[in-house]
Image (cartoon, helix red, strand yellow):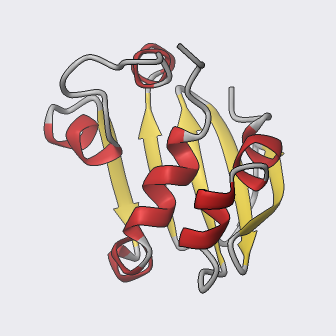
Amino acid sequence: MFEGLQDKANADPNVRRLGRTCTADFMLMAGDAAFHVSVAAGLVTGVSRGPFKMRSAAFQVAASDAAWARFMTPKPPPGFHDIFAMSATGAARIEGDMAVLLGHLGFFKALIASLRQEA
């Protein structure tokens, strides 16, 4: 589900610009599948599929496969347009170091949204 994240995000100049000061590792969970994402200076340097044992990550965003599928549509429905909207409606769970996430919020939102299908 998130395997194409590195290519799509790194090809988007806006995502790279927003993340130019961000270096972090985080996790995306789709159902039981875990994906570890590494970012260095705004470039996604790796996306690895788990399971993982003791893999360090600043935060994680977890949602069902169905919730991520709705998020990734070209024009997502209300409540699925953003990771915080998904969290507010109970469709996603965000855990971990909120300072890292909120400090680069625009970048992380654009990074994850880069997976959306084109209209």
Left or right: 1 as drawn, with respect to 96: right
Quadrant of the rendered image containing residue 23: bottom right
The residue at 50%/23% (across/down) is 72
Name the outermost residue toward the left. 88
Tell me where residue 117 appears, x and y as whole percent.
Answer: 59, 19
- Horizontal arrangement in the rendering, residue 83 relative to residue 116 (left or right): left
Residue 11 relative to residue 108: left or right: right
Residue 58 to residue 62: above or below: below
Q: How many marks?
A: 0
Q: Quadrant of the N terminus?
A: top right
Examine the rendering and report whether any part of residue 97 can be seen: yes
**Going 37% across and 60% down the picture, which residue do you hit?**
95
Residue found at x 15% / y 41%: 88
> Going by the picture, which residue comes out furthest to the bottom?
21
Q: Residue at x 68, y 72 (%)?
A: 42
Left/right of residue 70 with respect to residue 46 in the rendered view = left
Residue 46 at x, y percent in the picture: 84, 58
Does residue 78 lie above or below 35 as drawn? above
Residue 58 in the image, given as x and y percentages of width and height? 53, 73
Say if residue 57 shows up in the picture: no
Name the foreground residue: 106 vs 84.
Answer: 106
Quadrant in the picture for residue 26: bottom right
Return the x and y of residue 75 as percentages of the image width and height.
37, 18
